[in-house]
Amino acid sequence: MLDKAKKLAEEWAHAERWKGISREYSAEDVVRLSGSMQIEYTLARQGSILLWSLLHQEEPVFALGALTGMQAVQMVRAGLKAIYCSGWQIAADANEACEMYPDFSLYPYNSLPLLVKRINASLRRADAIDFAESKKDIHYFVPIIVDGEAGFGGVLNVFELTKWLIEAGVSAVHFEDQLPSAKKCGHMGGKVLVSTREAIRKLKAARLASDISAVNTVIIARTDADGASFISSDEDERDRKFIVGRTDDGLFEIKGGIDLAINRALAYAPYADVLWYESSQPDLLKARQFAQEIHKSFPGKILAYNCSSSFYWKKLVQEDQLHNFQNLLSSWGYKLQVISLAGFHALSYGTFKLAKECKEQGLIGYSEFQENEWEAVAQGFSAFNHQHEVGASYFELVYDTIVGRKQTKDHL
């Protein structure tokens, strides 16, 4: 036990991966809480290593929110190098309560790891099919980045949720600094923050869960302070200068905005690998200000930005600026960029469009849809052959292997 703790402490002190990361617990604490057998979480471990490498390359990591496993497979086949799991999308149409909810953390929080399991199951199936057919040009095991919401409770909730997500195969998780019981979508008004101290405790809980699991999970601290109106406590002196009043129900009114977001992100930086600035609008001036202030104290700190579906982009950003929006963000250190609700909108609009055309044109409408699918096959789209896509030919090979039937070249 002592040797293991010593080795872990040396890694924290000297490995480049942990440069600038603070832990207010010891290696002995981690070893004592890890149990007698170290379980291997291969997908999470390999994915976190890959994501950390990608975040240090010149191009930003760009991910779309996936609502189903099949969406994730098609995203990878289209060339994306990471998958995002949005809490909003899970609340809306992928939760274990089998309900449709707004983004208020109303759904059972095991819904997060269960969606990740479904996504990883689909990616594993796609890999198995290709590998059996000697197709090895696509790496399906891309990192999965998950929205941990506000943690669904206190530090122990965050600790357990992070463990479940690692078991499901997550590479990164972000936690926001909202009050879980009053949590709202990042682009809605009336948001209530927790104290800076409480937000840091949750980041520490996520890191401890990662350390106990022996996975270098990328911990992301998201601040929703830019659009916040209230805070639940004045316990932390770092928050007090932003408090401007008190409500009848015991909350504190605050002056939200970019200054508060910067103030909080600076406090979170030693405990997080990535800082996520949740902006109220796609404002490049504010994004640059946030990055500059963070990098004065923490040079090279990786940042994240939500290119949100809540923004009506062409109305809010001029087209010439839109072309260069992501490149500018990347140049300022926003190496993780997501469109969080992409899966929801793609599924909803694609289905509506198909249904409308079929209603108006019948089979002609569907045949034209098929033609569009067929044209996309040359670009990597694979679901046109739906039987093959879900593994029919793969399981025929499994059956032939079991019964001893000779496999022809057509199978391979």
Image: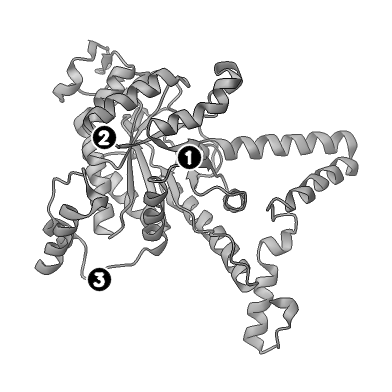
Q: Which amino acid does label 1 sit on?
A: Ser
Count of numbered circles on the image: 3
**How would you rate the neighbour count of disc 3 (Cα within 10 Å): few for under 14, some for 14-19, many for 20 or more?**
few
Q: In this view, does 87 lie to the left or right of 272?
A: right
> What residue sits right under mark 2 in the picture?
299
Q: Which of marks 2 and 3 is nearer the N terminus?
A: 3
> What residue sits right under mark 3 in the picture?
37
Image point (24%, 51%), residue name: 16
User: Label for residue 86?
Assistant: 1
Check the image and report above or below for 172 versus 396: above
**How would you rate the neighbour count of disc 1 (Cα within 10 Å): few for under 14, some for 14-19, many for 20 or more?**
many
Q: In this view, does 30 lie to the left or right of 158?
A: left
Instruction: Name the image quarter holding residue 232.
Output: top left
Query: Percent position (x, y) of residue 70?
Result: 61, 52
Label 2 – label 3 distance at C-alpha: 38 Å
Image point (14%, 59%), residue name: 10
Query: Percent position (x, y) of residue 51?
Result: 41, 50
Q: Is residue 132 left or right of residue 206?
A: right
Q: Nearer the viewer, residue 97 or 109?
A: 109
